[in-house]
Image (cartoon, rainbow, N blue to C red):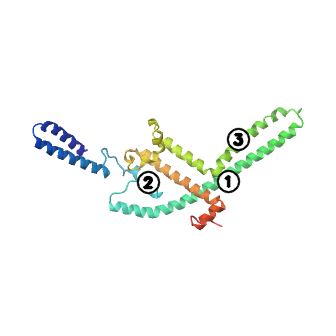
Amino acid sequence: MPQMCLSLLLQLVKHIIAPLSHRWKAAIEKRIKEVSQMTLAAVLRGARLQPGQYWNLSGTFLFTIYVMTALGFGAPVPRTIEGRSAVLVYASLAIPVHFYLMMNAGMCIVVHAQAYVKQLSRRLRNHRTFTGGKSNLDNESPNCSRHSKVLKAPSRCCFGLKIMRCLSVLNACHCVPLAAVVYYLTGACVFGKLEDHEILKVLMFPLEFTTSGGLEHQPGHLRILYAFYVEGAMMLLACAVVTFRRYSTPSILWASQKYRLFTTEE
């Protein structure tokens, strides 16, 4: 900001004194050029005209999530040697523990979710078989007084078939790609600036939480919410890895064992 004021002041002095002396004109133009170069160098080094604040409570919380998840994309860097040393010590302890917890939590989520889906599909299949048998028995005696109630069975069967189709769609590729797309679009709707009506900017909302994208101007509650969003993305990635390990084809398992991508249990 002082560089801009100095540049404007020199421009004003140039217009006032330049007609009186050519020597002053050359000196002022030289100084204006030097100030412009200094301003450009400061901007290239990260200086901003309206600097914000990185290291408050919300910014520090987001930074710890960045380090713990080993993401580090666009995260601010501590300026002092003590701060960087503390980050290295914290990362050496937090990253393995976080990875271990994410893999175990992902295994629990995948196992319980698939057990629930199988149980629900089994119930719907049994209900469909029961209603189908009941309708066949009642169709043999159309004069029965309950024949009008049995006519509602096909509609219930259709509803059960729709639920089964939805479950089959969710179970396709074990629901991981669909969940990833829905999760990203949810983040775009929450964090993206929908009032600008710029689709590309909305879809690239993670860039707004980087040092070059304007992280210092983001409010504190959005930083904390985005930190939890990143943690949820890591959980989804852990679920994808667990699903990949549990339901891989033999060729993929052979390649993973050959190149030691991950260990597989016999």
Q: Earlier in the sequence, mark 3 or mark 2?
A: 2
Question: What number is the disc on residue 162?
Answer: 3
Give the residue number, with chain letter if any, for mark 2: 73
Secondary structure at numbered mark 1 = helix
Residue 250, image quadrant: bottom right
| Image position, residue 221 (x, y; %) | 43, 45
Q: Nearer the viewer, mark 3 or mark 1?
A: 3
* Disc 3 to disc 1: CB gap under 8 Å: no
Q: Nearer the viewer, mark 1 or mark 2?
A: 2
- Residue at horizontal 14 percent and vertical 42 percent from the top: 25
Residue 222, image quadrant: top left
Residue 217, image quadrant: top left
In the picture shown, does residue 98 fall above or below 21?
Answer: below
Secondary structure at numbered mark 2 = loop
**Amino acid tagged 3:** Lys
Q: Earlier in the sequence, mark 3 or mark 1?
A: 1
Q: CA distance from mark 1 to mark 2?
A: 36 Å
- Residue at horizontal 28 percent and vertical 48 percent from the top: 40
99 left or right, relative to 219:
right
| Residue 209 appears in the figure | yes
Give the residue number, with chain letter if any, for mark 1: 115
| Image position, residue 96 (x, y; %) | 50, 63
- Residue at horizontal 87 percent and vertical 37 percent from the top: 139
**Amino acid tagged 1:** Ala
The residue lying furthest to the left in this view is: 20
| Residue 107 appears in the figure | no
173 left or right, relative to 52:
right
Quadrant of the image for the N terminus? top left
| Image position, residue 172 (x, y; %) | 65, 49
Q: CA distance from mark 3 to mark 1?
A: 20 Å
